[in-house]
Image: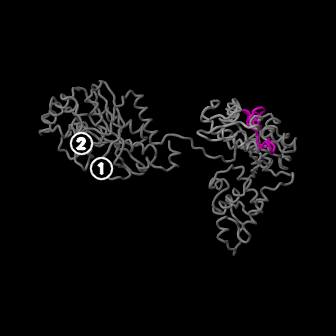
Amino acid sequence: MEKKWIHSPRLDTITMVEVTAKKYSRKLSKTELWKKLPKKMMYQTFSTIIDHLTEAKKIRLNEQGKVEWILIKEGQKETSEEKTAGIPAGKETETIKKELNKEILQEKTTELNDSEKNTVFELSEIERKALKVLGKERKELSVQELSEKAGIELDSARRSIQWLNEKRLGKARIQKEVFVVLGEEGLKALKTGLPEKKFLGGLGNTWKKISEIKAIPKQEINIALGNAKKKGLIELKKEQELEIKITGKGKEFLEKKSEEELMLEKINEKEVNENSFDAKEKEVLKFLGFRKNFLKHKEKGNEFIQITKKGLSGIPLLETQKERKYNLMDPVEEVFPGKKQPYFKFVDEIKQKLVSLGFKEMENPLIVQEFYNFDVLFQPQNHPARTWTDTYKLKKPEYGKLPDKKIVEAVKQAHENGGKAESKGWKYNWNEKIASQLMPSAHGTAHSARQLVKGVEVPGKYFTIARCFRPDVVDATHLIEFNQMEGFVAGENFTFRKLLGLLKEFAVEIAGAEKVKFLPDYYPFTEPSCQLNALHPKLGWVEFGGAGIFRAEITENLGIKEKCLAWGLGMDRLAMFKLGLNDVRELFSQNLDWLRKGI
């Protein structure tokens, strides 16, 4: 029987604390040192190890409250092995480990120090019940016995064993045991009989051809034949076909239950501990184990615990303080629950705010026709922004479909002569093929153009948060892929002043900007136009985006008579302000500390 003994603290745990204490000697407090351990452990266990190392004069807390390794004396040298293990020079490595292990694990006198008394006072209800039972019984108890005698659930008994062991009020061990259960074929044999018995039942007193045996299925005949032959229950001869005849031993086998059948009945549908079988039964088990799918073996570990001298010393203290004492001062492990990436969360919050204000979200495909990105927005086909230096093009497929011919014709007229608007247009021959070229959207306004073509409600409010692509030099405020919050409102009597107020509200409420200013600007598709800027504490004045009133060449040629106040703001820069970052690239950082502690 295999036994696995649990000791607490373990030798490798003690060594880990030693190595860490030595590495950060005079640099960290006790709590800071605990957080620097390569592997996590309970603070109570860590504190116990530190107490014993202090008592052994291996470490001390200096005047600054830092943990100091004090074993190495001046002039002593360490071997490379001792440096690796964190063991003091001048003594054998293994000897020191054994001494330290003995100090930590040995049973002390019944006198408890203040720290140990506090440990007893802080015991939970299930630990108190378990400790009292162990003190009364004064012997090793299994987890099942402890559960029954203490009147606690089995899972609670398991937890109490683990905790009492860690606090050195009890000594625990795990004993592994093997249990036997019947497999699929074993259960089948239990109900219908062993294959060889059914096989023998189909034989008479004379020789019988194997093809004439119908008592068992064909797939079982070979198994039954092999087992019956091995036990001497049949005779075989082969002429044209294999023939079989039952022996006297086979007839006796039919008349009474075999050892295998008795074993199957004993196990039945239960889980039976292997140790409950005698030597003869184990031989039968071994034979059944050779049969495919007859038996299954399950390994289970059973827990045992007995009280230590410290545990016995702690029982009287439970009577002096019957209610559990809680220590609210010890540090606890910081928990980082799962949550959204900070930038994604910021974007979702903006969407929710805009929707709650009555804005409708527009579609924002990654790939659009130049028709929407430029032409609907009255940007001429010879404009430098349409060249390879400022935009990307799609290689395959190269062209896309344009909308209804009436819309295409209206846009064409706007470019060539102004169309229905009081404008002369750009005075050039507009090319439909250029307009149908596909490209990754260069700005969010392409999606506003799609919405204008589809039609808008008046009054109406529209927005989208779109992924945009431009060849740019990547720096603290620029990326080649970025997000824009695009939108427009359509209504009567709208003014440029109203647009400025709306933009200022966005900068203050969404980005948390404290200072905002507007500069005049030019865009081919708005007039008048402006640029929105906000003051960043590190980067100075940063452009958030542009805005303006859609030109009449756009709206009137699409049948919209009312004013449309439009804007396109850099979501990445808004988020950079809100999240207190100095570089837009940090929004996509894999820094776990920022991802855990961001909004």
Q: Is residue 68 above or below residue 225?
A: below
Foreground mark, 2 or 1, reads 2
- Name the quadrant containing residue 506: top left
- Name the quadrant containing residue 76: bottom right
Q: Secondary structure at mark 1?
A: loop
The residue that appears at 45% across and 35% down in the rendered structure is 349
Q: Position of residue 445 (x, y in %)?
A: 29, 37
Could you classify mark 1 by the number of other residues whose Cα lies within 10 Å: few (under 14), some (14-19), or many (20 or more)? some
Q: Is residue 122 above or below residue 456?
A: below
31, 404: nearer the viewer: 404
577, 191: nearer the viewer: 191
Q: Is residue 460 above or below residue 393?
A: above
Q: Secondary structure at mark 2?
A: loop
The residue that appears at 49% across and 40% down in the rendered structure is 340
Mark 2–mark 1 Cα distance, whole angstroms, equals: 19 Å
- Amino acid at the residue labelled 1: Pro
Q: How many marks?
A: 2
The reply to whether the magenta stretch includes residue 267 is yes
Kindly report the secondary structure that dominates the magenta region of the rendered protein: helix
Badge 2 is on which residue?
398
Q: Position of residue 501 (x, y in %)?
A: 34, 34
Q: Position of residue 528 (x, y in %)?
A: 24, 37
In the image, which disc is placed on residue 471? 1
Give, as a single range, the part of the protein colored magenta. 253-282
176, 318: nearer the viewer: 176
In the orientation shown, which residue stands out farthest toward the bottom? Answer: 75
The reply to whether the magenta stretch includes residue 436 is no
- Amino acid at the residue labelled 2: Glu
